[in-house]
Image (spheres, rainbow, N blue to C red):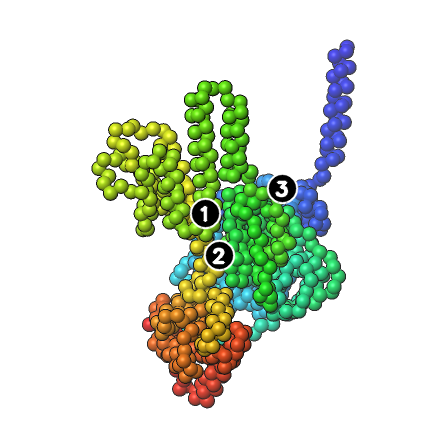
Amino acid sequence: MLVLIATAIFAAVMHVFASAVWAATPAPVTTLHAIHSLTKAEAQGGQPVAFEGTVTYYNPSDIDLFVQDGGEAIYVQANRNQKLLPGDRVLVRGKTRDSFATDILSESVTLLRHGPVPAPIPADFEQLIRAKRDCMRVVVRATVRSANTVNYANLHGTYLKLLLEGGSIDATVTETDTTKLKDLLDAEVDVTGIVSGKFDSKMQLIGILLEVPTLADIKIRKRAPISPDAIPITPMNQVLASSFIHDGTRRVRVKGSITYYQPGFAAVLQNGSQSIWISTRSSVPLRIGDVALATGFPDARDGFLTLNDSDIQDTNIYEPIQPQPSTWRQLATWNSGDPDGRQNDLVSFDGVVAAAVREGSQDVFVLVSNDKLFTAIYRHPTANRRLRPMWNIPVGTKIRVNGICMVAQANAIDPTEQEVPFNILLRSFDDIAVLSQPSVLSVRNLIILVSLMAALLLVAGTRSWVSDRKVRREIAKTAYIERRRSRILEDINGSRPLSEVLEQITELVSFKLYGLPCWCQIFGGAQLGNRPKELSSFRVIEEPIAARSGPPLGSLYVGFDMLTKQRTYEAETLSSAAALATLAIETRRLYTDLVYRSEFDLLTDIHNRFSLERHLDQRIEQARENAGIFGLVYIDLNDFKQVNDVYGHHVGDLYLQEVSVRMKRQLRAGDTLARLGGDEFAVLLAQVRNRAEVDELAQRLARSLDEPFAAEGYVVHGSASVGIAVYPEDGTTRESLLRAADATMYVAKHIRHERRQGQPGRGRPGPSSPEQT
């Protein structure tokens, strides 16, 4: 009887529990219309769905599935390698998620039956860019601007650039036929596909992408007037004459708090989780943290949303943005399907200082986080040459940096998850906070510890006089070795020459091994230390000086008596000394490399603007003391921008390198050639007798460009406009001399321009007029 009563009670309790669970579980949403009616918060909550729809696009090698039901369509993240075709009627079960618009993370996709594919809806550019046809099967009329075969991580097929009235869009086809691609170029076509989007790492729309199932969905309405292979050859100095651009982009206005500002270059506005890079020429003072209004023209280049040609107005309402603590994944991982990116956001990130250097235009801190390197950069104000001293932060210090996350590059065509380099742009040194100093386990502290241990041993020693004396000797030797090692470490980070540091290391080894000869051989360098002239009577032990990467840097040698046997402490001594030598060589090379980068232009290997200004200041001081004169030549390459525009930056870089080589051949010992930036160069003529000599050298530099340049199968005819200034006739300060030389250069450029306009067809081609060989 009791058993029956207990069974009944248990059944009643389970029924109540099941009813509560059933009541707490929301019913699935069963129509696309109901899904699109969900609020953003409801979609984020993962509402269960179970709806029917017709497949309009599915790529078995990918996870993208688009389904449509009447006038409603949606994106579904499905599994790979399912047997689904356009026209299949399917039942989709899963959960909603919030993305650019509500979409579905599927749990299962069940095939119900096969039927017709929904008829495509005509669409124009404005409907597409405003997301009014998102996920729908549409047909667009366009002109094909490019058609290429591509092979990325999850994209294999054909990639099209389509020009519609109002703007351009991209299209992908999951098959390719190279024989048909030429027929598509410049043809007027009707393209049937499914509307998708191109997004940045924060799920902001940066373009439209049509997912086209097959090449058969591209119908040629009107072929190109002329085949690409039949187009006549255009002289390269007339290429731009064929260009025609009608840009109807409307100016937009955005609002946000200023999180970064570099006058004359750029600013960043942030509003909540949204931020945007503002390109501007304005130098009006703006306060970080103020709410500002910016107007400009939207653009999306290389996967990033920007506002170009902008004007910014400060409202003087202070609403600062707090730096957002971020993870490495949020900063360095590019995934257009995840809205958790941090590009252009004000972020906070921790790292350990690996190196710090002041360059000509910026201070660079190299930081380590999770065994990965990134840089924090503070760009010097262009209007203020009196900079405060750079922060003296010891290597090994853990710091927190606040600044703008600037992603260095991203692939907008292949938006799959990938790790991309990034920098943190600092606004001021106040954006750096020290979290912890380097470890207390330093050489100095170890010496103090050893000394205390020696004192305790001396006070409390109970051994015999002989034992005490031996202990004292060993302790004194250890302390001396640690002091010598500490001094070597200080010299490594100081200004003592590397050869002297390496000789100190060999002397330390000799001392630890009771006076045995020790020397080192640096590969491609000198032999240092105490090497016996005759080695036949020695047992020589070699220890490579290993590099942290790549081949060894050299070897360390010790000569032992032939009759002695090798002991463990000998190998340990050599290994420790070799590690110390590695630290000395690589630290000095790193410092030398950083100093070189701050003085020289990395592209042309000549002095940069910072180095030229320093040489110019020194020469002015010398001329004042000696009542001397010197000259300054300002060189500007004519029409250089067209070389980059027509043939790309690689050919432009080769051209700049060859220009630098030619001009260096014209100079004398003591003259300084520098690249000021872009296509501008300057030469400091330290020893001249008069203005005529300066002018003669300037003309010689200009004539050195008369010979055509050959690069990547092209011939470029170069020329330059030059201007000169003579100290003290044209100025007695750096700024006045640069202005004078720049002014005369612009006069020469203006005269050249008028001559070319006055003699059409007779002027020699400039650097923007290359000819293919």
Name the residue located 39 percent from the left edge and 39 percent from the top edge: 508
Name the residue located 24 percent from the left edge and 43 percent from the top edge: 533
Q: Nearer the viewer, residue 359 or 267?
A: 359
Q: Position of residue 706 (x, y in %)?
A: 36, 78
The mark found on residue 746 in the picture is none
Q: Quickly name the residue at label 3.
A: 94
Judging from the image, what secondary structure is the residue with disc 2 in? strand
Name the residue located 67 percent from the left edge and 67 percent from the top edge: 285
Graded by Cα atoms within 10 Å as few (under 14), some (14 to 19) or many (20 or more), the crowding at tag 2 reads many
Judging from the image, what secondary structure is the residue with disc 1 in? helix
Judging from the image, what secondary structure is the residue with disc 3 in? strand
44 relative to 722 in the view: left or right: right
Asked if the residue at tag 1 contacts the one at tag 3, i.e. Cβ–Cβ closer than 8 Å, the answer is no
Mark-to-mark CA distance, 3 and 1: 66 Å
Q: Amino acid at mark 3?
A: Gly
Q: Position of residue 130 (x, y in %)?
A: 64, 61
Q: Amino acid at mark 1?
A: Asp
Q: Nearer the viewer, residue 1 or 303?
A: 303
Q: Quickly name the residue at label 1.
A: 491
